[in-house]
Image (cartoon, rainbow, N blue to C red):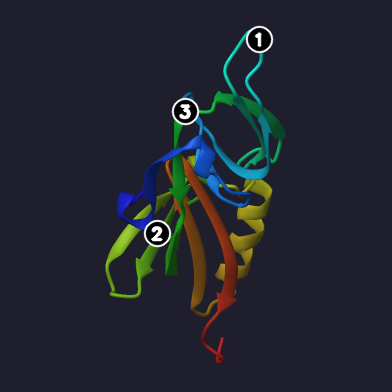
Amino acid sequence: MPEEHYKMTPTPVRELRSGRILQKPEGGLYQIETITSAKPGKHGAARVIVSGRNLSTRRHECFSYTGRASITVVTLGKARYTITEVDDDVTTLGVQDTDGTATTLDLTNASWTPEYYAQVKELLAGGGTWNITAAFGPGFLELTDLIQTDENA
């Protein structure tokens, strides 16, 4: 996945906001839904409780951090591609960016199911030029907005 499409920024937990995307150290990207602060008590430091949804699995999880912790906030990159090749093995998609540079998208971390991929392949077999939007993050790829761009097909 092209790293130039996304940005990773170390951020103090106290600066987190709802809607941002964080990367857990053990992996996984989570969109923050709520942030709750717990004041320091007799037996410990202040805590920040973050709840979010995993971008790949859509599962909801909660995490707890000390108030002075720093975590990685990810800004997903987006790019528009023209589909040039659809492989039978359902693991790669040949595309061309707006500058005409050809590349292959690795679909092993994509949010597409093999069934959906087969439906897209059938659509593409009908001819025409098709564009797709990709959102990138570390270990994450989401493909959206499949649009036929030529009217003659």
Distance, label 1 to label 2, CA atoms, is: 58 Å
Q: Which residue is mark 2?
A: 94
**Whole-percent x, y for residue 120 in the image:** 61, 62
Residue drawn at point x = 63 percent, y = 54 percent: 118
Q: Which residue type does callout 2 highlight? A: Gly
Disc 3 vs disc 2: Cβ atoms closer than 8 Å?
A: no
**Whole-percent x, y for residue 38 in the image:** 68, 27
Distance, label 1 to label 3, CA atoms, is: 18 Å
Q: Which residue is mark 1?
A: 42
Residue at the limit of the structure toward the right, as seen here: 60
Residue at the limit of the structure toward the front, as seen here: 42
Q: Is residue 86 left or right of residue 18?
A: left
Q: Secondary structure at mark 2?
A: strand
Residue 122 image-quadrant placement: bottom right
- Quarter placement of the C terminus: bottom right
Q: Earlier in the sequence, mark 1 or mark 3?
A: 1
Residue 150 in view here:
yes
